[in-house]
Amino acid sequence: MEARSFKQIQRAYGFDEVAIAPGPITLNPEFSDTSLTLGEHHFEIPLIASAMDAVVSPGFSGHMSNAGGFGVLNLEGIWTRYQNAEDILQEISTTPLDQITTLFQRLYSEPIKDALIEQRINEIKSTGAVAAVSMTPQRTKHFSKIAVESGVDILVVQATVTTARHTSKSERGLILSDLVKEIDIPIVVGNCATYDVAMELLEEGIHGLLIGIGPGAACTTREVVGVGIPQITATIECAAAREDYYNRTGRYVPIITDGGIRTGGELCKALVAGADGAMLGTPFAQAVEAPGLGYNWGMATPDPALPRGTRINVGTRGSLKEILFGPSLLTDGTMNFIGALKACMGMVGAANIRELQQASLIYAPDIKAEGKSFQAAQKS
Amino acid sequence: MEARSFKQIQRAYGFDEVAIAPGPITLNPEFSDTSLTLGEHHFEIPLIASAMDAVVSPGFSGHMSNAGGFGVLNLEGIWTRYQNAEDILQEISTTPLDQITTLFQRLYSEPIKDALIEQRINEIKSTGAVAAVSMTPQRTKHFSKIAVESGVDILVVQATVTTARHTSKSERGLILSDLVKEIDIPIVVGNCATYDVAMELLEEGIHGLLIGIGPGAACTTREVVGVGIPQITATIECAAAREDYYNRTGRYVPIITDGGIRTGGELCKALVAGADGAMLGTPFAQAVEAPGLGYNWGMATPDPALPRGTRINVGTRGSLKEILFGPSLLTDGTMNFIGALKACMGMVGAANIRELQQASLIYAPDIKAEGKSFQAAQKS
Amino acid sequence: MEARSFKQIQRAYGFDEVAIAPGPITLNPEFSDTSLTLGEHHFEIPLIASAMDAVVSPGFSGHMSNAGGFGVLNLEGIWTRYQNAEDILQEISTTPLDQITTLFQRLYSEPIKDALIEQRINEIKSTGAVAAVSMTPQRTKHFSKIAVESGVDILVVQATVTTARHTSKSERGLILSDLVKEIDIPIVVGNCATYDVAMELLEEGIHGLLIGIGPGAACTTREVVGVGIPQITATIECAAAREDYYNRTGRYVPIITDGGIRTGGELCKALVAGADGAMLGTPFAQAVEAPGLGYNWGMATPDPALPRGTRINVGTRGSLKEILFGPSLLTDGTMNFIGALKACMGMVGAANIRELQQASLIYAPDIKAEGKSFQAAQKS
Amino acid sequence: MEARSFKQIQRAYGFDEVAIAPGPITLNPEFSDTSLTLGEHHFEIPLIASAMDAVVSPGFSGHMSNAGGFGVLNLEGIWTRYQNAEDILQEISTTPLDQITTLFQRLYSEPIKDALIEQRINEIKSTGAVAAVSMTPQRTKHFSKIAVESGVDILVVQATVTTARHTSKSERGLILSDLVKEIDIPIVVGNCATYDVAMELLEEGIHGLLIGIGPGAACTTREVVGVGIPQITATIECAAAREDYYNRTGRYVPIITDGGIRTGGELCKALVAGADGAMLGTPFAQAVEAPGLGYNWGMATPDPALPRGTRINVGTRGSLKEILFGPSLLTDGTMNFIGALKACMGMVGAANIRELQQASLIYAPDIKAEGKSFQAAQKS
């Protein structure tokens, strides 16, 4: 079969398959700088709360800012469709699971109100927080104007799969380079997962990149349409694009791994793979302060013809402060994300996240098996 | 061990191991053309209902044609052995599982009637549908004459493993190139799974190729005799044969991935692997209109000495229209196959199936694990 | 790390990881010749019943010969320690599992009687069967004399791991080349699993080779001491040694895959990997005629200090004839081994086992997953 | 993507993925020498009991010495914080699991007493045992003086991740080469897992190296911070450093695989991977003589902000003598470690551990599957 040319299949890695190798130097964790810079904004912690209705409310944005990160409010969700968003979230949390898809499809067919966009941004600003909001590419022309006029600080343009080149029969699509020129605040764009697309998006002049296609716990895009790239490989590819772009242009654009992170270990792996920060959904939906009341769902869930995800009972684990900084009573990595990050940075001798990105990853599919099945069976 | 020559083992991939990588362009799904051409027949959707007794009845062929695809009636099953086929199917659906192998062995020992072949084809034609029927190579000489005289539109010659070169002690075997000359309608042949066999079959002059050995949910050929090739690799190999044959002769022969597809994601992966269409069993057996009454079984199941498969309770999920086009209330990819296909085509920027075949596949064995075990545990 | 030299780890394959690829020709199964030649003995089927107390009694040897294969009686088990072996086997089958290791350690400390060796061989001969018996290398000098004088036809010298070079403090060890010269009947030796050891054993002049270290269902050697090689790789390596030895000397010595085969599919894979025949334990222990009464255990099980295995409830599936030739009511490959073998030979176009050895293997770890989890969940 | 440079991911192997290949020679196990030399100390068996509170008490150190190995007492655990350590261990064993993290965090905040260090070392010495104690690098300057003055024989300096270069804001960190000069007894240092770090530590002049980061059954470091290397690869890398250092300097420093070993098979694999000895936790916690009363927990478990592990119910399997030398009634490899080691050495023809290190490893992920699922299901 020498002369034949078969379609090639590239290897891609997910969180569970890799581990971080300790380096030649260790460091006292007190030294470690975990900060993230996005445009002119400087954040003490590299964590962003996902633009999901169960994760970020205007109030939750305030809590995230106080903790040193920021949250992104979804402008196409419950909060801009309903004045009484809390009541709607209550209804979602109390509806039986077998009726939830129908409920979602009904609730998300309610129109978005421009006035609510303005109101929600004002609510965020009133907490003193950095106001970040998200919208899909199709609605960006209209919504970005309202948001900027309302004083928003960061704009997130987000779809399941985003490219710089989109073809549509309808009105002329969104040109990101035009948007960058028109608007004077940082623009974060996603989601993408490969070197080529990341590079094309960076060349549009945007200020941040979201990495990840379909990896979240609340999303079944990969089952339904077969599309997806595991997060370690996606992050490695896009980080390579960021470096090449930086070396060529001198402009450093942070990349944010978005989706699939449930533990401190996974956060650390994403940063070692090359991310500058991470967007978390489920871990924040587990905070006492989260609007989802112990539940979470993906933004592709309400799709009327092709729902991709459902409501998940994520439970409530503790306050946002405990989830971020501990102390933890849980030993599975789902609390004290920043404590875990600092401990990891100490073990690999990284004084900041740029140094953490230089640590080594190993492929170790069996790493969870060692002793763990025993542990699972014997815990008592 | 340098000089020693050990038997080589080639890597082969199945559906669960791969995912589709998004491409550099996205497309509005409304652009996408999902059609399949087979001989002079043009179908709006690239889906074919399997020649299984629980899937295709004459009436179901009508429904498939109305929906834009077609169904294949098995000429060696219940429908041509029994006038009262519905009663037999009812009996199968109500027999306890521990008696089902015995029942199958008895039911399928009833002789096939020529008159019923003619009658069933007439029943299909009376619905206005494209009439497609299947038979095994051993019986093709006799049955193909009756079928063609009855006005059949497409002939499917199908066995577990089919090659252009078959040796038998009995009467001279079927010569496909002779059959092609004698018969003036498209002939689809299968099943095969490797480049070499696909190329030899294409050179016989046939008009379509079925890909897949033993992958269906209702088949245990791989356990019983050890033979089988996972569908992604089988499709990639046979698609390479189709391309090489096309480049050499100018004749384009569609290849159809047959078996093992349960979700929209798997359908999309088969087409990205190179298929022009897909033959589905279990998903159609789950339609309200299917003759199996919520059950399915493979055609190797009734083998009297070496049964390979059993009756599976597949349940009923919705109407054929809902299974094909939605709307879906299920989020696991088992409904709205065409909606999923169009969404996938949009994400990889493919305007038609030839373009979809150019998308990239990645090997990501862990892709299902990311977040999914969590989801499974927490759903409520 | 370029200049560093780390210990290399070679990839090895087991049954579940591979599948057989269909070849360019298919064949009517009625053509297939499944015979095995061992010394001057010619067997219609390539199957040997393992030298395990639950598998081969003198009577079972008779049944195996009638069916076209042969069984090997273990000269160091229950049958040569106890006159009333059936009573002992009855006791084993009725003892609670938590007392079974103690029972085994007591039962197998009873001395072996020379008179019982002679008696058991006579019992086998009286059935008209080919009499084959096994012993460990340490006891071969003494036992082989008694066995040959009693008229045995085939001698099997078997230990967990066998090499041509063994060092011992006690009396001078067994020299296989001497044994071959002294004894005029075929000598089968095992077990080994690598090219080098297989070649050294072949050069001693022996007549058959058993392949497999620790793979059987009734053996935990791999857990306890870490030693083992999966059967596909073991068979591939030793088959390469057989070929090289045959090409150099013109003497063809059959190799027998021993252990781990539970289904027709696994038998077929072992032969495609290069075996000339297979030794089966558990499948024959499931025969009505087997002495184990529905149970099986490995010969390392009774080790007083380091037991490696336990009693397994294998159940009773049917008569030996049904297990070998069907008809089968089971669809999982555990009955009708010869029917499965012939079907496989037809699918890959092999007229005999030498041709079957030329078929291709693929590495397809996911092959069981395709559709099977669905099937498992939905069977009803 | 030719010119692009993506982050590389190195393959790493764990216990369950590999097996030992038998070699060309076999040996009577009575020949085998299993001894380990550490500094001037010579031990008959290459096993060390872990510095865990549930494993080593002063009394258990005595039992280990009698058996031919040695135990390491943790100077920062229960035994040096509490005079009535047995009462505390009793309390740990009877506290419900949902309160255990809180209890650990409270118990381990009690200060360590210098007087108890002296007392515990005297207690060990009074049994006639080799006295070995462990401490973290931060406390080594202070504790090592007390220990040496109290007559300790072996010093173990141990942290989750240890390097020769550690940076801290506080007082000048521990310089291992200084410690080696100041103290006249063997110093064992760990834990490390890579060639580079092992080489740097060896060059400090230390006398033994502990290998393994986060692999134990009682540790969740890998989940919480993502850091870890499977033990086979860690041992192979560090053994390569030992060899290169030995060839360059003539000084042979034994390396000890620490953590994750639960069976005789895993012990054998660690030594074949290149270790000179192994440190075991859980297997010794299962001894009647162990202070943990049937429980075990890791030393990262009590971390107040970031607990990494919990209390595991390991049960009690037998006396230390039975666990080390049998006889065994268990067939899963968890008893008779030395019997298993000698059996393995016989199968690969190794007369001592240096020869055992030369045996071959294979990568066989499927090796446990062969026959074992069957066994698990059928045991009765």
Image (spheres, coloured by chain):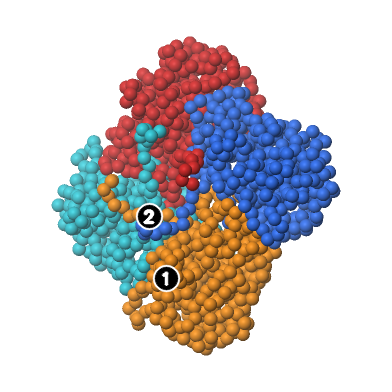
Chain colours: A blue, B orange, C cyan, D red
Name the residue at the left extreme.
C181
Q: How far apart, in angstroms, are the residues tagged by discs 2 and 1?
A: 32 Å
Residue A280: name its quadrant. top right
Which residue is at 40% across, 75% downward? B204
Q: Which label number is shown at residue B249?
A: 1
Q: Secondary structure at mark 1?
A: helix
Q: Is residue D65 visible?
A: no
Q: Is residue A374 above or below residue C291?
A: above
Q: Quadrant of the C terminus of chain C?
A: bottom right
Amino acid under disc 2: Ile
Residue D221 in the image, given as x and y percentages of width and height? 56, 34
Residue B214 in the image, given as x and y percentages of width and height? 47, 65
Which of C252 and C142 lies nearest the eye of the viewer? C252
Q: Which label number is shown at residue B9?
A: 2
Residue B231 in the image, given as x and y percentages of width and height? 49, 61
| Disc 1: CA contacts within 10 A as few (<14), some (14-19) or many (>=20) | few
Q: Nearer the viewer, mark 2 or mark 1?
A: 1
B55 sits left or right of A189 in the view: left
Which of A40 and D360 lies nearest the eye of the viewer? A40
| Disc 2: CA contacts within 10 A as few (<14), some (14-19) or many (>=20) | some
- Is mark 2 in CB contact (under 8 Å) with mark 1? no
Which residue is at 48% across, 72% downward? B208
Tell which circle, 2 or 1, labels the residue nearer the N-terminal end: 2
Which residue is at 54% across, 21% downward? D167
Which residue is at 59% across, 57% downward? B349
